[in-house]
Image (cartoon, helix red, strand yellow):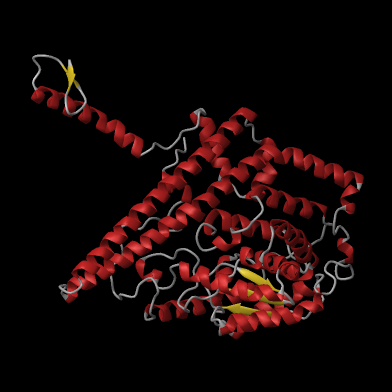
Amino acid sequence: MHETAAGLPQSPGRSPRSYLALLLSLLLAALPVIQASNQQAVPRPALPPEVLAAMNEALLRPYLELFEQAARLEFTPAQIQEMRRYLEQARSNCVRRWRERARQLERDLEKAQAELRARTAKLKPEERRELHCQIQNLRLLKSQADTLAEHAVPVAFENRLAKLELIEKWPQDEKKIKEELASGAYINRRWGDVLDIGFRQVGQGQEEDIKIGQETVEQMKLAGLMPPEVKNEVIQQYVARLTREVARHSDVRVPVRVTVLNSKEINAFALPGGFIYVERGLLEAVEDEAQLAGVIAHELAHVAARHGHRLMRRSTIASLIYQAAQLAAMILTGGVASLGTYYALQYGFYGLGLVLSLDLLGVSREFELEADQLGIQYAWHAGYDPKGFIRFFDKMATQEGYVQGISWFRTHPPFYRRMVEAMREISFLPPKEKLVTQTDAFQQMKRELEKVVAEAKEEEEGRPSLIAPEQGCPAPEKLEFKPGERRIETVCDMPTS
């Protein structure tokens, strides 16, 4: 015997043509296997269908419901462990698939740009416009795929894993909390002296931070990183009154300056020295005054504990602004509404807008936990339902956080620890009657906000866009994902039963 050019052994009497036919038949038989390996199947958990369905249903419940129901859920340790293994595998699989999708879109984009370069001298106006539209649509789709792979999918799965951990661990954690309440040990926790809020020492020397805060604001404005203010007195005055009321019941010892920014980002942030910024997107996202008070109280806690001072010195302000501008330049913003969706970190149609998140400020995970604890105390002390903070966190993680609120989850403590520590603090607070959840003033603010949003969208239509410089292009035939249409996990077709 000897080998053919294809490397197959050839017996005497066999013609090369017969071996070619054999080779082709082998390749055709292997095609389904090759395709299956390239399109890796969604992993399935080794759980009975009824158990999988019940677990999926439980993981869709809000955190506050799970806190109440965890002890009554009858899942075995083995079932919980198998579900955890499955979710981790599904997350890895889903992220990999969207990274591959982003790479393919990048190749398509490079191909379209190469065609534009090669044919630029010969293109007719309508052909050039068609290529421009193709390129900007590919940019949008790649931006969506990148966002899904690097932010949205990981946050979605981390949220589900946290709820699974809550089902597993909360009954025992709750037992420890009850033991601390019964023994009185809870009073000795850090900042356990909640009846002395405003008279205790949380962050000594807050007044020293005012100058650095002022300098930061000035430099950010000069650098074009500060969106314009919302030009609506009702909204500005409402947010200012609420912020000052919570501040009055906090450990903040400096004057608080409050500004509402006309930005779609779902966020609020505090600069050293009492400079509080609330972005329009946050006001759109909150559902009641207790949620908004909880978020604002969290930001006031950063001021009171001097987290910004401890991590952001004057020498780092220029670096912070540079990083913010650099991040903004990397993100496709503005005009995406005309293409059918809002994606990535959005700052609307006001240039690059403000890109300021916890990692740029240098806020650590431990500082976030400290701000959670103090913020819950401040909201409670001001007469608000402190569970509003948990409800808003749940909303962000479950509905909004994948896309518009990504900065909320840039540098966060693990979800489970953050939720448990928040619930622990709420359990230790002295009971209060008639805690506020909703007010008429909040609802009036919401009505005014509708006008501001409508005006912003109308103004957006005619503005130049970083992502869509070619006006009037048809939207992509198929978007990668539309927020609100389905849960983020379904982008990888997770089995539910």
Residue 121 locus on image (x, y percent) = 17, 74
Task: Answer whether residue 443 is visible to the viewer in this image.
Answer: no
Q: Count the marks: how many?
A: 0
**Quadrant of the image occupied by residue 11:** top left
Residue 23 locus on image (x, y percent) = 18, 27
Residue 406 lies, with reference to residue 184, above or below; the image says: below
Front residue of 127/234: it is: 127
Kindly identify the residue that appears in the image at 54 percent across and 46 percent down: 157
**Quadrant of the image occupied by residue 141:** bottom left
In the shown orientation, is residue 14 left or right of residue 348? Answer: left
Residue 109 lies, with reference to residue 337, above or below; the image says: above
Kindly identify the residue that appears in the image at 49 percent across and 50 percent down: 153
**Quadrant of the image occupied by residue 446:** bottom right
Residue 244 locus on image (x, y percent) = 74, 77
Front residue of 29/337: it is: 29
Residue 394 locus on image (x, y percent) = 61, 55
In the shown orientation, is residue 133 left or right of residue 68? Answer: left
Kindly identify the residue that appears in the image at 53 percent across and 59 percent down: 400
Q: Quadrant of the N terminus?
A: top left
Task: Answer whether residue 59 is visible to the viewer in this image.
Answer: yes
In the shown orientation, is residue 424 left or right of residue 462? Answer: right
